[in-house]
Amino acid sequence: MSRTSTICPGCDRDDLVQAVPAVYLAGRNAVTSRERDRDGDMRTVTRTVSTALSDALAPVPEPPTYAIGCLGVLAGAVSVGTFLGGVLAGKWFREDPAHEPQELGGWQLLPQDVPADPPAYEFLGWISALALLVAVLVFTLVARRRTAFTRITRRRHQAEELWSLGWYCHRCGTVHFEDVPGEDRTPLTLQRFREKVWEHGGYGDLAAEQRAVDPARS
Ligand SMILES: [Zn+2]
């Protein structure tokens, strides 16, 4: 049997306590709760739960950004473009009448005998090769990052298991565990909760890098 409510150890009240997954999923949605006003009457309060709170309660780290992938696509496009440009320029070069076989004193000079400046299209070839190298490097980097992230978070189900047993108090801005072996009911800051959950998933060190930003205290 799972609980539907619990008393917050910080304020000894249950009216603003909500299961962590519910708070997390609410995201930007409005959350309605019952609250006692100054006259002691119960009233329905609608609060807009910020994404910041949802973010702070995330059970897994942010996946790596793939913005650098755009650079790879761009480099790939440059590589193909300059390659095609080089092919066309090479074609034009061969059709250049200056490089047609020439007569000189009765001897026919073949095009390769005609002294010529280094063809400009060679530079396009170098740019194409360089851009291709950049594209390959970027895509390798993105693939490695993705693999690393999947490997680091492979035990995320364990973290999510502990995470789903957390209770968030909207009044105190803290999370506590209820009936979790090895965990007491001490109210935890969002950062401390993140550390416990992420450590459970085996990626606790990332909690130090990606700190939980408490929207109520920032
Ligand atoms: Zn509380």
Image: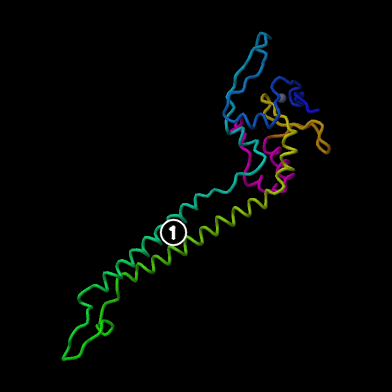
Quick one: quadrant of the N terminus?
top right
Compared to 19, does 96 lie above or below?
A: below
Compared to 200, does 79 lie above or below?
A: below
Amino acid found under the numbered disc labelled 1:
Gly
Nearer to us in this view, 39 or 181: 181
Magenta residue span: 190-218
Q: Is residue 180 left or right of residue 84?
A: right
Compared to 56, does 133 lie above or below?
A: below
Q: Is residue 135 left or right of residue 118?
A: right
Residue drawn at x 66%, y 8% is 39
Residue placed furthest toward the left: 105
Q: Secondary structure at mark 1?
A: helix
Identify the residue position indicated by label 1 in the image.
Answer: 76
Residue 194 magenta-highlighted: yes
Residue 196 magenta-highlighted: yes
Q: Position of residue 98 (x, y in %)?
A: 20, 77
Q: Position of residue 120 (x, y in %)?
A: 30, 70
Q: Where on the image, by quarter, is ligand 1?
A: top right
Residue drawn at x 61%, y 36% is 55
